[in-house]
Image: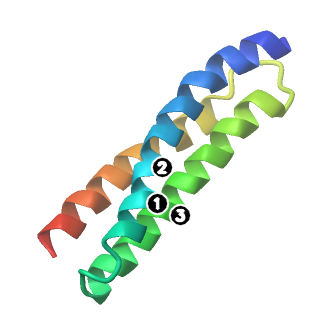
Amino acid sequence: MSVWKRWRIAFPLLALSLLMFVPAVFGAWAWWSENGAAYRVLSIFICLVVAGCVGVSLSVGIKRTEDVPWLRIGLVALGVLATCGLAVIRDSV
């Protein structure tokens, strides 16, 4: 697979991951002192999962491969779903 094709796949994944990462980190920082320990732990875990999604998205564009990296694309999708689920749990705490 060419470099251009890899980055064409990686760019939407990276954009989605960054669109989730920036608000997650800012929200954790902004409301850190106003919430309890469970909320803080879940916020940190959400930030870590989304940071992992950013890293995996970058690896899609950087790492050479002959075919479509379905496993890494699936990991990003799973990370996004896990983040959404954790956010629902965090808001119920």
Tell me if mark 2 has few (under 14), some (14-19) or many (20+) residues whose alpha carbon lies within 10 angstroms of its own. few
Toward the left, the furthest residue is 92
The residue labelled by disc 1 is: 25
Residue 31 appears in the figure:
yes
Near-viewer residue (39 or 75): 39
Residue 1 appears in the figure:
no
Q: Where is residue 5 drawn, in percent x and y?
A: 74, 11
The residue labelled by disc 3 is: 48
Q: Residue at x 36, y 46 (%)?
A: 81
- Check if mark 1's residue and mark 2's residue have beta carbons within 8 Å: yes
Q: Image height check: is 60 above or below 30?
A: above
Q: Image height check: is 60 above or below 39?
A: above
Name the amino acid type tagged 1.
Val
Is label 3 in a helix, a strand or a loop?
helix
The residue labelled by disc 2 is: 22
Q: Residue at x 56, y 47 (%)?
A: 53
